[in-house]
Amino acid sequence: MTSNPDNGNAFGFTVPTDRDRLAELGGIAGGLVHELKNPIGVVLLNAELLLKHMSHSLSPAEREREEKRIRRIIDAARNVQAVVQSFLSFARPGRPDPDAVSVNTLLQTLLDEQADSLENAHVQVSFHPDENLALLAADVQQLRSVFLNIISNAREALMTRPDDRRLLVVTRSAKNLVRVVIANNGPPFDERVAAHLFQPFTSSKEEGTGLGLAIVQRLVEMHHGTVTASSDKDQGVSFTFEFPTVLGPAKARTELPMPSVEAS
């Protein structure tokens, strides 16, 4: 009896690879979403109707108690919806629809959109774009999801600091390469979490699904890129993304003169 050196063992049993598990996970995901989507929708709809049409005969104390119970049902159902959607996003991410993306512009847009949230959290943001950064052939919505996940995680992590909360975003060029670094001076990863950071269902958050960074890695890999993370109690946490590109710098086109037309 022989064993497959790639996915077997000394006894000839086949050991599932990560790709096998992901394929199986993807197969389960479709059925899972179909089975859960409608029941969750029914629960949410009826809970919201109960909340809207609550009896006016209840005393203020009874009404407040019933509202709290119904809102707990609504919140729980929405949490299940979020878990199901995260599971589907991880197991069956959409195929990238590439376009020529200016990563600098995308990051600036995200930081502008998150400005109020970051300001309310007293986070000081520093953005240092490389003006000669090349365009990237990528799905802009998927890249948006990648960077927004990291920025949102940073804001949440920084809330554990009493003050001096800092977020740093940097882009840099290398030959045929776009590099993005998103760093913050929040607490380092827990050692148990750090060892399995990009694996599914790994989270340091009590209410986290543990799929956010796994989805980030899947989307980055689908763009033939890499993502690495480091953390240190003195330096904080940083994520480094590298994407290959063959496109030129994202500079504005020079204005060309209108061609002259002579009457014949």
Image (cartoon, rainbow, N blue to C red):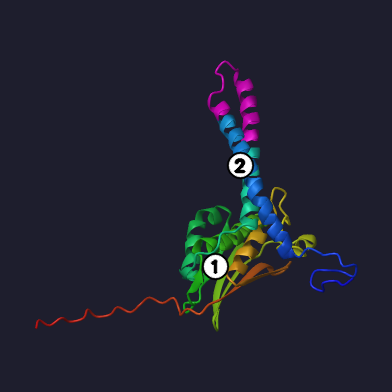
Q: Name the one closer to the observer, 30 or 101.
A: 30
Q: Seen in the image, is 13 located left or right of residue 61?
A: right
Q: Earlier in the sequence, mark 1 or mark 2?
A: 2
Q: Residues within 10 Å of mark 1 (few under 14, many from 20)?
A: few
Q: Residue at x 45, y 79 (%)?
A: 249
Residue 259 position in % (x across, y down): 21, 81
Q: Residues within 10 Å of mark 2 (few under 14, many from 20)?
A: some
Q: Residue at x 56, y 23 (%)?
A: 54
- Whether residue 208 is situated above or below residue 62 in the rendered picture: below
Tell me which segment is drawn in magenta. 49-75
Residue located beneath label 1 in the image? 126
Q: Name the one closer to the observer, 229 or 165.
A: 229
Mark 1 and mark 2: Cα distance apart in space: 41 Å
Q: Seen in the image, is 205 located left or right of residue 89?
A: right
Q: Residue at x 17, y 82 (%)?
A: 260
Residue located beneath label 2 in the image? 37
Q: Quadrant of residue 201?
A: bottom right
* Quadrant (top left/top right/bottom left/bottom right) for the N terminus: bottom right
Q: Name the one closer to the observer, 204 or 29.
A: 29
